[in-house]
Amino acid sequence: MATEHPLSPEARSILGARISRRGVLAGAGGLGAAGLLAACGGSGGDSASSANTVRWGNWPLYLDFDAKTKKYPTLEKFSKDSGIDAKYFEDYNDNDEFFGKVQAQLKLGEDIGYDVVTPTDWMAARWIRLGYTQKFDLANIPNHGNILDSLKSPSYDPNRESSLTWQGIMAGFGWNVEKNPKGIHTLEQLFAPQNKGKIVVLTEMRDTIGVILMAQGVDITKVTEAQFMNAVDFMAKKIKDGWIRGVKGNEYAQDLTSGDATAVIGWSGDMFILASENEGKFDFAIPESGGTISGDNLMIPSTASATGKANGEKLINYYYDPAVAAEVAAYVNYVCPVKGAQAEMEKIAPELATSEYIFPTEKTASRLQVFRSLTPDEETKWSEAFQKAQGN
Amino acid sequence: MNITLPKVRVPYLLLFPGFAFLFTFFILPIVNLAQTSTETPISGGDTGQYEQTFAFSNYLHAFLDNREQFARSFIFATLSTIFALAIAYPLAYAIAFKSGKFKNILLVLVVAPFFTSFLLRTIAWKQILGEEGFVVPTLRTLHLLGQQTTITSTSVAVVAGMTYNFLPFMTLPLYASLERIDPRTIEASGDLYANALTTFRRVTVPLSMPGVVAGTLLTFIPAAGDYVNASILGSPNTKMIGNVIESRYFKIVDYPTAAALSFTLMAAILILVTLYIRKAGTEELV
């Protein structure tokens, strides 16, 4: 580290700036600070050639957000320091859906409206395979080496030449503590009588089927088609028999809070936020038989302009600064992929520095597995079976 | 006056904007969809890469694999059309004949749901019918609902949501045709010693048939292709054909099957609507 406490004084300066800006804006009515900033920056629209912009498409609730100012503190700071106007879009809701929307433009080489995208591992693999990404200019990303060793060489990008992990996601069991006082650690406990008709599982095939497969004693890094189909049949039966009420994306969180669901196969970060927002009414655990881990990846699409690419690389580099990564992790509570962030977390939120959700220990990490990559044929066939099991 | 355009061309010129719009946003996509529907995966290609092989068997597979969802779509659409008619007819009748000075307010109230998004209204239904809403606990206290029974994630919730969402489409045409009825015809019926029920059956209903036909079509057609209600209020056991098309397109990235399913759905609706109009008589639509 160059300085002892790089974050605190800067954070304080942002905070100071924000307060003073709010003072200036008092009485400005509906005109938001963001609009004002954009006006000052002199950049408008989403045209790719705009010299000082970077457009980032990311999943919802996936970046530190200040509810009071309606701004993203770390992103604000990036814009302020670099002079690059960062436009942030929370419209990455589903891997398949996003790909479906931009695929035609990628194929034709037309601007898709983003300079940085955030697909999950298996989808990142597809983008790379199809040549829809650009290789990083590592000179722009000196923090490149900060990625955790365990994430350094995935099969789809062995040298991390065109992707860097944004956050890691664990999938396991989440439950309502009142209805499941003993917690849920096995598949039998998930399908306990009190949860009948109130179980929700994830639309992410690799997470839902991965957790079921591991409970069936299958190694998901080597899973065969027969084993996979067997697990899908298991899920289909649980749906037909009325145990599972829905197969959902992030909406499972609403079902838990509304009482419609009492037990889920869900994601660590969501469950952590739910638990803290509802005074411990919910809890999460990695199944005894193991959970899945996957990552969302920062990538530059092939359609980004040279400036868009360079700006995107600067943005990626910024978020690989351990202090910034810690600030993001303190908000999103997903697995932080950046070396040194744990030490930085000690300074800003010591209670989170020991969180297994953000910084899994060796022991925890050994219980998490990555679903093996699939060939295009398998991908189509397996996801078809998974969709059919959900009644589609 | 110096009119430079021959009169004959004027109607064509007036038609041009509409035709150009339909060509770009209806004909071209339909042709594209038709092309896609007979494609097959490129061997050794990546997910989502297809080539034209004129595989008409796609249609057969698409239909046979999803008979259950097709059947469910048409059953749900029929049920919600019937329920919407049952609710909308008395409503439209009351607004047309009995509302007096409140007529305009009532009409605005019928249209008011359109001021918020379709999605938001459906999500609101999910909250209302959910475990912590007031409907479920009330029904449980009254022992009308078992302790373990829920309303959301059932066919009941899906049909109820569809009935609600399409109700204005049923009410407005019904109101328009009821309102047009000449009160003197009803008086005449009374003069001829018909009682209220007979008047309603022999005069009001036949004269409101254009509204009934228009309303049922405007409800049934979108309801058959709807997937929002089934995905928000339903469960995996209540999926409709719209859900299958969405999943084929976005999740499995199987564009040909999604296209074939869309065409099959269009054809099925077209056949049913044609039969219905034949039976009801086309003149009723005018």
Image: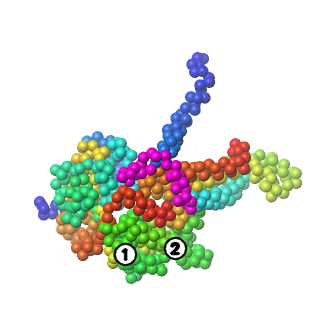
Chain bearing tag 1 is A
**Amino acid at circle 1:** Ala
Magenta stretch bounds? B40-69
Q: Residue at x 28, y 74 (%)?
A: A367
Q: Which residue is mark 2?
A: A241
Asked if residue A177 is positioned above or below residue A132 in the image, the reply reads: below
Q: Which residue is mark 1?
A: A215
Query: Residue B11's spot in the image, x, y percent?
Result: 60, 29
Q: Is residue B282 left or right of residue A339?
A: right
Whether the magenta-drawn stretch holds residue A72 is answered as no
Q: Quadrant of the N terminus of chain B?
A: top right
Residue B158 in view, yes or no: yes
Q: Residue at x 38, y 78 (%)?
A: A186
Would you say the residues marked 2 and 1 are in contact, meaning their CB atoms lie under 8 Å apart? no
Label located before the other in sequence (2 or 1) = 1
**Amino acid at circle 2:** Asp
- Asked where in the image residue A385 lies, by quadrant, the reply is bottom left
Query: Residue B52's spot in the image, x, y percent?
Result: 45, 45
